[in-house]
Image (tube, rainbow, N blue to C red):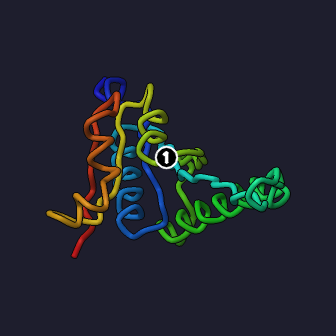
């Protein structure tokens, strides 16, 4: 009966860093307790190059946008695959679904957490001025996520 109350979906942000690997491993361990599934989300963003052109002339595209977009998406998929392999050298557990999301990491994770039971992110453990200057995905999702959030701090 308890499993019926806690089963569901755990979304975890994965960026390839060791803190995100720790968050992913934590999420999988929690999912095993809950008999839940894990959605490992890697967020990427495509920033098109600036068009080339002289002042007063019509700008010309710098290249093949669809091709560049697909190359960026493929690179993001490779990063997600590498992160899963690094977190689970013997293979990712079957309850882990890998997903790409395009956009700002903070906003994309909040969107991906819609309908989830838990959102898990890793923290690099920055504090003070470094955290204020660099911004913080974990701070944003704690404030805006539609579900409970667990921040897994990197071990020293």
| x and y percentages locating residue 6 in the rendered image | 33, 30
Which residue is pictured at 32% across the width and 41% down the height? Answer: 141
Q: Quadrant of the N terminus?
A: top left
Q: How many marks?
A: 1
Q: Place residue 101 in its image quadrant.
A: top right
Farthest residue in the left direction? Answer: 128
| x and y percentages locating residue 49 in the rendered image | 69, 60
In front: 79, or 37? Answer: 79
In front: 64, or 136? Answer: 64
Question: Is the residue marked by circle 1 packed among few (<14), some (14-19), or many (20+) residues within 10 Å?
Answer: few
Which residue is pictured at 49% across the width and 46% down the height? Answer: 104
Which residue is pictured at 29% across the width and 60% down the height? Answer: 123
Which residue is pictured at 47% across the width and 33% down the height? Answer: 111
Q: Place residue 106 in its image quadrant.
A: top left
Farthest residue in the bottom direction? Answer: 156
Q: Which residue is mark 1?
A: 104
Q: Is residue 33 left or right of residue 95?
A: left
Q: Is residue 147 left or right of residue 126?
A: right
């Amino acid at each position: 009966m308890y499993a019926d109350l806690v089963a569901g979906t755990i979304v975890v942000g994965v960026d390839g860093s060791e803190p995100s690997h720790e968050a992913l491993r934590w999420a999988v361990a929690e999912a095993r307790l809950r008999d839940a599934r894990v959605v490992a989300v890697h967020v990427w963003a495509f920033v098109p190059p600036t068009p080339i052109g002289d002042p007063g002339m019509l700008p010309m595209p710098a290249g093949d946008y669809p091709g560049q977009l697909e190359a960026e998406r493929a690179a993001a998929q490779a990063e997600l695959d590498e992160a899963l392999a690094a977190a689970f050298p013997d293979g990712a557990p079957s309850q882990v679904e890998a997903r790409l999301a395009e956009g700002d990491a903070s906003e994309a994770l909040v969107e991906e957490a819609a309908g989830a039971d838990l959102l898990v992110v890793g923290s690099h453990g920055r504090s003070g001025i470094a955290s204020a200057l660099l911004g913080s995905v974990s701070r944003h999702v704690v404030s805006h996520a539609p579900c409970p959030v667990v921040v897994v701090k990197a071990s020293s």
